[in-house]
Image (cartoon, helix red, strand yellow):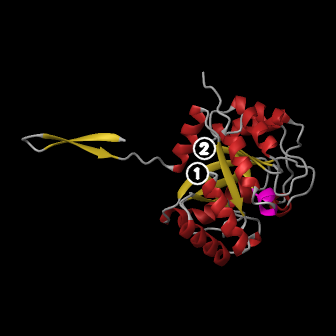
């Protein structure tokens, strides 16, 4: 809360003004304070109405921080319907996690402007961004430039197939941290390391730790996280934000334990 001062000539009046941080500021401030965030990934193509209602109620009860909304094959009509449904039922911020430049909607709160820095597909480095930029400039969405890094999770995922790129090998920490450093130096505001939906092997704590040590921007980690124990291991290794989707689609009740494990960790900042 910020106190503003109004002088009407005869007396001084203090006016309370609420400071509202942007979504990116929230991510950034949380990293500085060592606070960990939990994101539930919702793929509109996979959501059944009844199960979505249960996910939303559990997310509210568990104090989930954000929803990422996206998938590899969704269409706008389905996307809009899901966003409207979520907004009716809760106030958790909704951030688009687009699989392509057509997966956009004004009904969300923000958007991860993803540049696939682990691959060499020019369309996903900058090409699609050029096409979508005029639309995004007119929108009220908060745009968050994000370096997206695919990490090999042991199986070919939809995102690696559709993006026509090879993921970074899971045991090549040096490639991962050099890629993340380059992304930050290019001006990207966050790094998102993803093993992909349904990954057999989640990203190792060693890779997370190495990447965390060389960047000063929020680090998001997702893909193959199936247990609260793995979620906690990832935040202890240095992840600032944990994203879970596939495991929750199969068992929404995991939300409570996942949230408790992630939020229980707070790194001391020297």
Does the stretch in magenta take in 79?
no
Q: CA distance from mark 2 to mark 1?
A: 7 Å
Question: Which picture quadrant has residue 169?
Answer: top right
Question: Which picture quadrant has residue 217?
Answer: top right
**Left or right of residue 4, residue 35 in this image:** right
Q: Position of residue 143 (x, y in %)?
A: 55, 55
Residue at 76%, 33% in the rendered image: 237
Q: Which mark is residue 144?
A: 1
Tell which residue pokes out farthest to the left in this image: 10
**Left or right of residue 259, residue 31 in this image:** left
Q: Position of residue 156 (x, y in %)?
A: 91, 57
Residue at 84%, 51% in the rendered image: 224
Q: Is residue 107 visible?
A: no
SS assignment at label 1? strand
Q: Is residue 18 above or below residue 248?
A: above
Q: Which mark is residue 45?
A: none
Q: Position of residue 186 (x, y in %)?
A: 64, 41
Q: Is residue 118 visible?
A: yes
SS assignment at label 2? loop
Within 10 angstroms of label 1, few (less than 14), some, or many (20 or more) residues?
A: some
Which stretch is magenta? 245-250
Whether label 2 touches label 1, CB < 8 Å: yes
Mark 2 or mark 1: whose residue is earlier in sequence: 1
Tell which residue pokes out farthest to the right in this image: 154
Within 10 angstroms of label 2, few (less than 14), some, or many (20 or more) residues?
A: many
Question: Which picture quadrant has residue 262?
Answer: top right
> Which residue is disc 2 drawn over?
189
Residue at 65%, 49% in the rendered image: 146
Q: Position of residue 6 (x, y in %)?
A: 19, 43
Residue at 37%, 47% in the rendered image: 18
């Amino acid at each position: 809360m910020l106190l503003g001062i109004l002088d009407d000539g005869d007396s001084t009046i203090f006016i309370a003004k609420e400071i509202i941080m942007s979504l990116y500021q929230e991510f950034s401030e949380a990293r500085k304070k060592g606070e960990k965030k939990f994101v539930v990934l919702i793929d509109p193509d996979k959501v059944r109405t009844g199960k979505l209602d249960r996910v939303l109620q559990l997310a509210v009860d568990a104090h989930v921080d954000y929803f990422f909304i996206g998938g590899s094959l969704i269409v706008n009509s389905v996307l809009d319907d899901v966003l409207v449904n979520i907004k009716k039922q809760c106030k958790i911020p909704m951030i688009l996690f687009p699989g392509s430049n057509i997966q956009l909607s004004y009904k969300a709160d923000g958007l991860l402007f993803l540049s696939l820095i682990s691959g060499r597909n020019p369309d996903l480095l900058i090409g699609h961004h050029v096409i979508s930029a005029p639309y995004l400039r007119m929108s009220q969405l908060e745009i968050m430039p994000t370096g997206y890094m695919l990490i090999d999770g042991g199986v070919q995922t939809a995102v690696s197939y559709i993006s026509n790129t090879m993921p970074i090998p899971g045991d090549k920490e040096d490639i991962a941290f050099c890629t993340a450093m380059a992304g930050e130096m290019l001006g990207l505001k966050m790094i998102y390391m993803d093993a992909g939906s349904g990954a057999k092997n989640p990203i190792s704590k060693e890779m997370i730790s190495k990447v965390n040590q060389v960047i000063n921007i929020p680090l998001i980690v997702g893909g193959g996280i199936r247990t609260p124990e793995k979620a906690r291991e990832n935040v202890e290794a240095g992840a600032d934000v944990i994203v879970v989707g596939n495991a929750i689609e199969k068992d929404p009740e995991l939300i409570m334990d996942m949230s408790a494990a992630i939020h229980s960790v707070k790194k001391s900042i020297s």
